Image: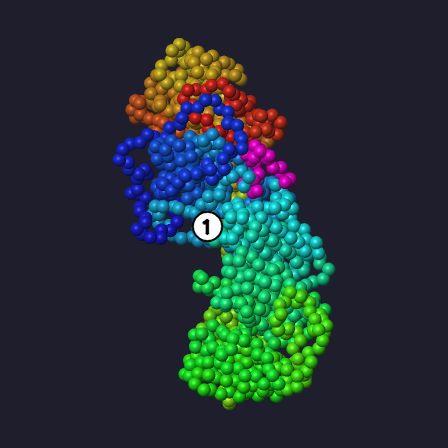
Amino acid sequence: MGSGASQPEEEDDFMDVASEEPKPKKTAPKKKTSRKKRKGNKNPETNVPSTTKEEFLADVDFEYIDNHACKAPHALLYSSFVELADYLTDEGAWQDDLVKVRSVFRWVTSYNLKKLQIDPNPPADSVLEYLSKIQCNIGNHANLFYILCQMVDVPCVIVDGMTKNSAYKLGEPLNKKAIKAQWNAVYVKDEWRLIDVYWATTCVEINSGDTPGEIHMAKYTKRRVERKVKLEHREPVDECYFFTEPYHLVWTHLPDDEKWQLLPHPMKQSEFEKLVYVRERMHELEVEFPAKKNRRVNVFLKQGIGHIELDLPPKRSKFLRFKYVFYRSKGSMEDDKDVDVLLNNCVKMKQTGTNLFFDFDVPVCGTFNFEIYGKDANHPDLQEFDLMCTYSVRAPVPEKKLLPLPDNPDIGWGPNMTTLKSGIKPITHKKSKIVTDDGIIEIKIQAPKDSNLTMETRSGVVDDATLTKYVMLRWEEGHYIINTRLPKAGHYIMKINARNPKKDTEVENVLNYIIKHNGKQEVDNPFPHIENNALGPSENAEKLGVRAVFSETIVRTKKGNAIVEIEADEATEIKHEIDCTNEDARNAMMATVSQEGRLHTYNMDLPVAGEYTLNIYAKKESNVVHVYSFLIISVGKQKKPLGNKSDRSKSRGSLSNRSGVTDFSNIPTTGKSNTPRLITKTFRTKEVELLVPAPDDTTNIVATLTPKDNQNETVNVAPLRKDGSNWFNVPLASIGEYNFDVITQNPDGSLNYVAKYKIRRLDINSAEANEPEQPAFDPDAHFKARAKKKQAMVQGLEEAIESKNAGMIEKAMMVYTANVSNNNQDQLLERAEQTLKALAVRKDLLNAYEKRHIPTLERRLNRARACNYNKILDSEIVLASRLLDRLNTLKNLRKEVMMTDTKALTELKRYTCPPAGIHEVMSCTLLLLGHPPWEIDTWPKCQGIISRTGKESIKFKMADFDPRDVPLDVALDGKDMIDPYSEKQIHDVSPTAAAFHYWGTRQLKEVEATAVSLGGKNFAPDDATELETIAESEGSDGTSTEVMPLTQENLNQFDKSTNQNGHAPGQKTSPLRPNGHGPPSTAHTQSQKPSTRPLSDRTGMTNGTSRTTPPLPPITPRGLYSNGSNTPSTLTPRGIKIFEYRNTKKKGFGNQRKLGIIPDWKG
C-alpha cells in the first residue's frame, strides 16, 4: 500500500501491493451492490427502542462478518468508496441491514488512524485520501461511517452534539465549542440504534488506574515504510459503542436535538452538565447510583468529610473488585506536597454484599479528582481494571491538619466479599473502624488454622518497624486473636493477610481495620521481642520436624519458675532467645537448656514479675530460621496482688467485647520502667544498596536479609569498615520490602536480637518515592539530580515537538528556556520555534480550507509551502491544492454557463418525443437545479422549464448553482438517471444535450467531492454568497480567461473535435459501474490546471479536469433551526426549494433508492 501502512512485522504475513488484486477472486459472480427503491424522502420517526441491545443482538454472531471486514485488501484504500462498499457487502450478497452495518462498523474501527502512516500525497478521490483528511482534522469518523452506510444502502444520520471527551473539564461549566462532536444513528429492523465509531476506536485501551488522569497512547515513531503491507488490520474495538443503549450513551453524549437521545424523558443540558463522568465499565458491571446526590459530578466536603455510595448487582457482587485513585486536579490553585503524595490514603473504601462505600477524610483544601475503577473476576473480558466514573471533589480549608492514613488497601476497609470468600469471619469487630482510649485492643477472628493469618500494622505517628513491638498474634481455641498496645494517639491501620488452604494460593489481603487512638491514656508498654509478631509455631516448624510438647503458647510461672519443652530431630541444631522489656528482669533472668534425644527442655528462672518471650530457632544450612515463640508471664518470686476488680476494668476503652482470655493490660512489673533494648527502624530508599550502621563489636554478629514476599531467600550480610565506623552494605536486588535482622551469638548458644530493620526499596515513579524528604546536602547528588532534571526537560521538549501540539510545545519551551537554555543558537529550541510557526500556518490553512475563499486559500497555501518545516505540512498542502483546483474549476464552469447562447436550446425545444437519453440527461440537470421529481417526470414538463426566460431560465439557474445545496441522495438519484449514457452516445443524437450531460456529470462529481470535503463542518463563507466569492476571486488573480460562448458555430466545431477524441460509440468514459455510485477512478493522482476551453468543447469527460476530492455527505440531522422554522435560514432560494422537495410526502422517481436519511446542510 505504498506509504499508507505501518512497518511490516512478519514476512509471511505480507505481500506486495503491486501484485495484489483490488478484489478477491470469486468462483462464481455475485450480484453487485445496488441501491434499493424507496418511497418519499421523509425520515422515520424517532422513538425509544422497543428492545435492549442484548435482546436485539440475541443469538447473533458477528465473527464471520468481522473477519471479512478485517481482511479487506489494503488495495481498497486506493480505490473508490464504491469498490469498498462492494467488498463490505460481499459483492452485494449481504442484503440484511444489520450485517451491512456491522461490516462497515468493523472495517472503520479496524484501522488505528493515529498510527497509520499515510503518504502526504495519497491518490485523489480514494478512500485513503479521506483517511488522510481525518488525520488532518478535515474529516471525521462519523462522516466516514455515514457515507459507507449510504453506499451500502442503510439509512443513517449524523448526530451533532456534545461529548465529554478529552476537552471536557471535570466539574466545570460546559464549553460547547470545545466538546462539540458527532456520532451516528442507523435505522435497522425498524428501530434507530446509536453508534459512535470514534469512541469505539479510542476507548479500547484499558486504564488500570495506575497513572491517575491519563491513558498512555502508543508513542508514534517514524519508520521506514516499504511497499509491503500487512494483510489484516484488526485493531481492538470497544463494543459498548456499537448499538449503545440510549440511557447509557446519554451520560457522555448529549445531542443538539433531544429526539436523538431516544429516551422517553430526554435529559436537559443543565442536568447533563451536573452528571458525574461515567464510562462504559460502569454499565458493563451493572453498577448503579442509589441517590441523586451521588449522580452529581461535584462532591462538596464539609470539614474534609464526605461520602459516596454505589449499588452493586446482587448476583455479580461477589465477583466484582474495585480500586480508586484520588489526586489533586490540574486546575486546583492550592498545593500541599506533604499530603498530596498520600491523597489515596485519605479515602476509605468498603465493599459489602450490594454496596460500595467511599468515605473521605481530607486534611487539606483544594479541588481533587476521584476516579473509581472496577473489574469482574468471573467475566473473561472484564478481568482488567478499567475506569468506571470520575468525581470532582471540592474540599474546604480544614480546622486542623491531620496526616493521611499510611496505606489504602485495594479491597477496602472492614469485612467484605474477599473476607467472606476466604473463610474469615470477624467475631469481635465487625466494622471497619475501631476506636480506643488507651490503645489496648483484642480482636478475635474465626478462621481455619491452616489459613496462616499474618498481620501488618502501620501508622503515621509511629515508625513501622517500631510498631511491631506493640502488636501480637496467636491461635487459641479455634480462633486467631490479635492484641495491641498502641503507644500514641492517632490513626493506625491493620492489614490482615491469609492463605486459602483450599486453593493453595499465595497470601492475599483479606481484612483491614482503621484504628483510632483518642489518646485519653497513652502508655508505652511494648511486648518483648516476638519473632514475626506471632506466638506458636511458624511455617518452618513442621518442615523441620519441631513441635511443642504442650500446645499452650502462653506460659504462666509459679514462684518465678517456668519449664518449656519442645521436640526436634537430633540432627537439627536448636537455638533460643529470651527477651524482656524490663532492664532489671533481663539482668536477673536465667535459663538452663538440656537435651535428651529429641526432647529439648528450657528451665527458666524469672525472679522479676513481668512479660518474657522465648523464641526458638533452628539452624537450616547456613541460616537460622524461626520455628516457635512463647510468651511467659511471671509473677516473680513473691506473688503480688493484681489489684481489685475495679482497678483492672478501669479505662479499658473498646475492650468491652473481649472474651475471658488473658488481660494483657495488667501484667505485673517491678523495678525500673520498661526500656526495650531492641533497636527498630524503617528505611526507605530508591537505590540498589543501603548502608546500615553496625555494632562496634562485630565479632559474633550475624546479619540476615530476607525479602518479605519470599522467606526462603535469606542471605547473610557481612559488616565492613568505612570512615572509622562499622556498616552493613545491604544489597536490594528488587523493588519491595525486606526484613534486616542483626543478631549476636552468645557462648552458650543462645541468641540476642540487637536490631530489626524494615527496608523498603521504592519504585522511582511511585508516590511514596516522591514523598518529601530533607536529606543532608550532597553536592555530587545535587548536580546529578540537576543534570537528570535537565535531561528530562530536553526529552519533554522533543516529545512535544513530535506530538505537533502547539500548546504542549509552548509549555515545554517555557520550562526549557527557564531551566536549560535560552540561547537563540540552540538547535532544539530552533526546532521548536520552527515547528510552532508551521503549526500556526497549518491552522490558518485549515481555516481557509473551511471558508473556501479562493484568494485567501491561495495566500495561505503559498505561505504553507514557504513554512513547511520538516515537511510536516505536506498532507495539508496536497489537500488544499486539490480543493483550490476544484474551486477554480467550479468558477470557470460558471463563467462558461453565463456566456452560453440561449438559441442553442432551440434544438431541445423542438423535440416532441426526444431520442433515448435526452429526457434522462435533462431530468438529471433539472433535478440538480432543485426541481422535484413530479415536475420533470414527463418530457413536456421538462420543455416548459427549459423554455423559461429571465432569472427563471435554466441558464441563470446553472450559473447560480452551488453543489453544496444538493443532498447526496438527490445526487445519487441523478447519477442513476445519467449513468447509463455516455457523452458520445448523447452527442451522436444532440450536441446541445451532450453539453448538459457534461455539466451534469461535472456537477455530480462536485456534489460528491464537496460532501467529502466538508468533514462534518460548515465550510461556506460566513458573510458572502458563493457568487460574491467568485466575483472577488476573479479580480484577485489579475489574469483574464477567454471563454467561448455556447453557439451553433461552436457546436459544429465541437462535432469535429469530438470525432477526433477517439471515443468509440457507446464507450463509457466514467469508470463507475452502471449500478454503482460514488467517486470515480483514481487514475489521476495529480490534479491538472483547469482548462480554459468553452463548455461546448469539453463535453468529453476525458478532456475535462480530473476531480481531486472523494465524496462525503453534509452531516447535520434534520430539525428546527435558528429562525424557528423547519427550513435552514442560511440556504439560497434554490437550496430552500430542494429542502422542501426533500421533505415532501409526494412520491418520487421509481428508481429512487430505499430511504436514506440525509442530514440537512448549513451553508
* Residue 1013 drawn at (x, y percent): 48, 35
The part of the chain drawn in magenta is 249-271
* Residue 619 drawn at (x, y percent): 45, 81
Is any atom of residue 459 visible in this view? no
* Residue 1120 drawn at (x, y percent): 59, 28
Is any atom of residue 134 visible in this view? yes
The residue to which callout 1 is attached is 379
- Image point (71%, 70%), residue name: 651
Quadrant of the image occupied by residue 1049: top left
Circle 1 SS class: loop
Q: Residue furthest bottom?
A: 747
Amino acid beneath label 1: His
Establish if 744 lies above or below 880: below
- Image point (39%, 40%), residue name: 61
Queried whether the magenta region covers residue 547, the answer comes back as no
Of residue 939 and residue 543, the one placed in the foreground of this image is: 543
- Badge 1: few (under 14), some or many (20 or more) residues near its Cα, within 10 Å? few
* Residue 254 drawn at (x, y percent): 57, 38
- Image quadrant for the C terminus? top right
